[in-house]
Amino acid sequence: MKLAYKNQIIIAIIGLLSASCFALQAQNTLSESERQRIIQQVKKEVLEGVNIKYTKPLGQISDGFTVSGYLEAYYSYDFENPDSHNRPNFMYSHNRHNEITVNLGFIKTAYQTDKARANLAVAVGTYMNSNYAAEPTVMKNIYEANVGVKISKKQNLWIDAGVMPSHIGFESAIGKDNWTLTRGIYAENSPYFNTGAKISYTSPDEKWLLSGLVLNGWQRIQRVDGNSLPAFGHQLTYKPNSKITLNSSSFVGSDKTDSLRQMRYFHNLYGIFQIDERFGITVGIDFGAEQKSNGSKSYNSWLTPVLLIKANATDKVSFTIRGEYYKDAGGVIIATNTTNNFQTFGYSLNCDYQIQDNIVWRIEGRGLNSKDEIFIFNNKPSKNNYFVTTAIAFSF
């Protein structure tokens, strides 16, 4: 218990004892009702004056330690009406059809001081089932597990290691932090998380963030068997003011065994612009290339431009429209085994209602139009896919 808090209690006790002594002395000079009125007034002023309150911030369990949580339940209806209840295999979030289920739920413990930090979060949900399918059983529910130390007394310079959120992209697995309910194709098919080590520097004015990473692979906790080559990445973020964020991120590495090594080069670039209190724009583009075969000088490439526009209708209601295009003619990331492979336009409109600060309800309609017939509608091949999703997210 802090010293100031102890002093407050002592002062309060003295004040209350004084009120009691006054009551005894005034017993023969004042009426009972007048005496009780004065006593209650003294007690009220003493307690309010010393402000006897000692509460920790929400989620804080002790100095440096906090506990937080997140839960997002959803229902999605795909007009293809797949019997398996699985949405297309390039969707890794909100990917169950015609059932009420959980996309992501986690409990997180965090530790933060001036010189050290750590995070541990375990999670469940369809997001975890899809994104961690390649990991060993013991790791399939590790949403986050990392530790960091500050390595400079004068600069904001840290080294972190473990399982961490990805340095790539403006969307995360935590739905409430994104403008749209569902994730874009660009986000679903680039890393949601990293495993490795990171050195990061934040400038004194917090306008610049620079990170360098050594990783186990392309969204992997456990490295691919037979792959001895670490992957590398960078992140450079510039925030000239509270309304603009510019980001550049990269990945360089191979996701195959040494004997089949095909180098992959990927760059993510985006900008977030808050025009005013009501309107915001996010624009981004991803570009990637991978060797066609081991040692080849030829590459298959993919390209992904995206645009989001968000409008706040009221303090509680907002709308976001999204347009995106994903071109992967070589089938590096999304292989369809069709003439043109995966070349698809996407668009969506969603509405959010902020029930309270930590609860949001969302609904979204979305369509996908592909160059080839890669979808199924009415039991026939189709170039189009349409679906509606609703979700409610809670956090503490």
Image: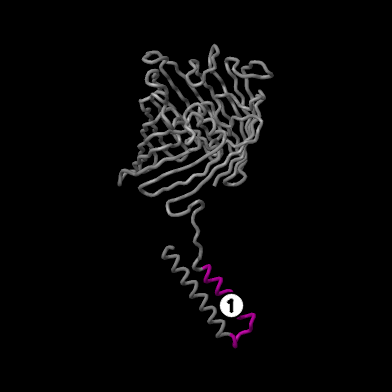
Extreme-bottom residue of the structure: 28
From this viewpoint, is residue 246 visible? no
Q: Position of residue 52 (x, y in %)?
A: 50, 65
Image quarter of the N terminus: bottom left
From this viewpoint, is residue 35 visible? yes
- Front-lying residue, 94 or 46: 94
Residue 315 occupies quadrant:
top right
Residue drawn where x is 64% and y is 27% of the image: 85
> Which span of residues is magenta-colored?
27-48
Extreme-top residue of the structure: 339
Task: Name the main secondary structure of what is drawn in magenta.
Answer: helix
- Front-lying residue, 297 or 257: 257
371 lies above or below 186: above
Residue 238 occupies quadrant:
top left
Q: Position of residue 148 (x, y in %)?
A: 37, 42
Q: Residues within 10 Å of mark 1 (few under 14, many from 20)?
A: some
Q: Position of residue 78 (x, y in %)?
A: 65, 26
- Front-lying residue, 306 or 228: 228
The amino acid marked with disc number 1 is Ile
Residue that mark 1 sits on? 38
Answer whether residue 271 is magenta in the image.
no
Answer whether residue 43 is magenta in the image.
yes
Residue drawn where x is 60% and y is 20% of the image: 369
Residue drawn where x is 63% and y is 22% of the image: 385
